[in-house]
Amino acid sequence: MQKTLPAESNAIFEEASKGLSKFYSYSGFEHATVGHFVMILVGLGFIFLAIRYDYEPLLLIPMGFGILIGNIPFAEGAGLKLGIYEEGSVLNYLYFGVKYGVYPPLIFLGIGAMTDFSSLISNPKLMLLGAAAQIGIFLTFIGALVLGFAPPEAGAIGIIGGADGPTAIFLSSKLANGINMYEGKQVQNLIGPIAIAAYSYMALVPVIQPPVMRLLTNKRERVIRMKSPRMVPKIEKIMFPIIGFLLTGFISPSSIPLLGMLFFGNLLKESGFTKRLANTASNSMVDIVTILLGVTVGASTQATVFLKDTSLMIFGLGALSFVIATAGGILFAKVMNLFLVEGNKINPLVGAAGVSAVPDSARVVQNEGLKYDPSNHLLMHAMAPNVSGVIGSAVAAGILLSFLS
């Protein structure tokens, strides 16, 4: 009996050792790489910026935590169905809305239901500033081609210049999804890097835009006072989404999924008879979709997919496109002033709001203007090119999709 005890103890020890070894092989520690920890730090950085500096917390907190979720290492070949790219996993099902461009139109529905286009309707010439800011999209497209990206990939990267996260996700899901073929080659899956770049720069609007605004304007231009917007009657507010959709739909049919939902949401708001639907679209629904979009986009940035040279190039091009878009709006406002009579001129700072980071760009314009004249409020004027930038970036996305898909 005494001789069997050591043998039994050894057997128990061996079984326990095997169990612990198997447990360790399934844990994240076994499969962790430097890349995983780098991405975890990026996710924590997003959460820190959102909470500490109030940089787009509704976007950066879900996205930052999504990055944490997507970069916990696991045994990919074990059939656990955990990763966002593994068929049958919960994250993969949620990612469907990103991969096939379902979430962005729903976001646009909510944006339309919460947007007041009165400032644009009362001063339609400011729409030109929103159009001018889209130059960042097309110049970045050319830059991406020069760096060796395929045309569909370059088009998806270029849309970062529109400063519109949902539009960037929508276009990249169509052009740079890792599924489509171009000239016999499979395009890269760039949805994650493009979305992260777009939302990162949207959050950094208060940091990126002011230096460009100061560089391209002088003190006299910064204190220009603009006429107060006129009161817009109810009938004009109702007709705007209908006429706006028909015009943009015929110009760029490929943008219908985005602009159709944007103008439909606005009609729900302005009609006066669908308040309950408008409230749902602008509150509960858009909040749910924002959570799903942020978490799944963040989770898609697995270290093995995200940490590549292409991601660095995308971030560099994205920063450049933001600067170009801001400069385009400001410079076009200065050109317009050459043809406008005194008393009807545009404060060039307002041109910076042509990028479609709503309402962040308009707030930056307001704050920058108040520094030079505490009684000169530019917010309502800046909202006009800001909301027209949303329309312009969606039209530009539709044009790129038509030519490159």
Image: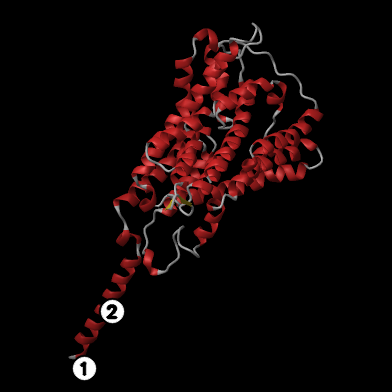
Which picture quadrant has residue 170? top right
Q: Is residue 232 above or below residue 198?
A: above
- The image shows residue 145 at horizontal and vertical percentages of 41, 37
Farthest-out residue, top: 342
Q: Nearer the viewer, residue 80 or 177?
A: 177
- The image shows residue 138 at horizontal and vertical percentages of 50, 32
Question: What residue sits 76% from the left and 21% below the top?
Answer: 231
Q: Nearer the viewer, residue 310 or 229?
A: 310
Question: What residue sits 69% from the left and 31% below the top?
Answer: 116
Label 2 environment density (alpha carbons within 10 Å; few <14, some 14–19, many ≥20): few
Q: Nearer the viewer, residue 49 or 290?
A: 290
Quadrant for the N terminus, please.
Answer: bottom left
Farthest-out residue, bottom: 1
Q: Which residue matches tag 2?
A: 15
Residue 166 appears in the picture as rendered: no
- The image shows residue 154 at horizontal and vertical percentages of 45, 40
Question: What residue sits 73% from the left and 35% below the top?
Answer: 241
Left or right for 182, reference 18: right
Q: How many marks?
A: 2
**Separation of residues labelled 2 and 1 (CA atoms):** 21 Å
Q: What element does badge 2 sit on?
A: helix
Q: Compare marks 2 and 1 and give the one earlier in the sequence.
A: 1
Q: What element does badge 1 sit on?
A: loop
Label pair 2/1, CB-CB below 8 angstroms: no
Q: Which residue matches tag 1?
A: 1
Farthest-out residue, front: 183
- The image shows residue 110 at horizontal and vertical percentages of 66, 42
- Say which amino acid is labelled 2: Glu
Q: Is residue 256 above or below residue 378?
A: below
- Say which amino acid is labelled 1: Met
